[in-house]
Amino acid sequence: MSTGPSTGPSAAGGRPGARVFAVLVVGPSMVPTLRHGDALLVRRGGRAVRAGDVVVGVFRARPDLLVVKRAVRPCYDGGWELHGDNPLVTDDSRVYGVADVLGRVVARYWPHPRWFRYRSV
């Protein structure tokens, strides 16, 4: 779980090791893409992570901190360089170094995506 200004997810459900699990965004480091309170579905496995994907990972220097960041580039030792989308928050690989990716964000389910919203008639 995360504390401070990082966009760190907190476990919102699912069993450890599950193929799909949910996380809750905490903090502003992925604004404007994601905001504090967004609930995400994350998929473990599937297609390989690519640069530009939004992922959930753990920095090797901070194994207690689960984060949602954008994958920038793979590192020589199998990890990834991860950055936040908010240029004012730099608590990412620029500070903590290499991260191990746990899964790729595949959907935001709260607040409801636009296609879930209903209009009254």
Image (cartoon, helix red, strand yellow):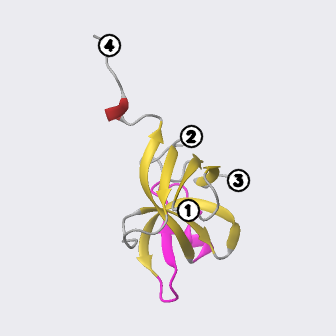
> Which residue sits at x=67%, y=75%?
61
Q: Is residue 4 visible?
A: yes
The local secondary structure at tag 1 comes to loop
Q: Residues within 10 Å of mark 3 (few under 14, many from 20)?
A: few
The tag earlier along the polypeptide, 2 or 4, is 2
Q: Residues within 10 Å of mark 1 (few under 14, many from 20)?
A: some
Inter-mark Cα distance, 1 to 3? 14 Å
Check if residue 82 falls in the magenta segment.
yes
Residue 76, given in percent of the width and then of the height, sits at: 48, 89
Check if residue 98 falls in the magenta segment.
no
Magenta-drawn segment: 75-97
Give the residue type at disc 1.
Thr
Numbered circle sitting on residue 3: 3
> Which residue sits at x=61%, y=55%?
6
Numbered circle sitting on residue 37: 2
**Disc 1 target residue:** 90
Give the residue type at disc 4.
Ser
> Do the residues under discs 2 and 4 have CB atoms within 8 angstroms?
no
> Do the residues under discs 1 and 2 have CB atoms within 8 angstroms?
no
The tag earlier along the polypeptide, 1 or 2, is 2
**Disc 4 target residue:** 120
Give the residue type at disc 2.
Gly
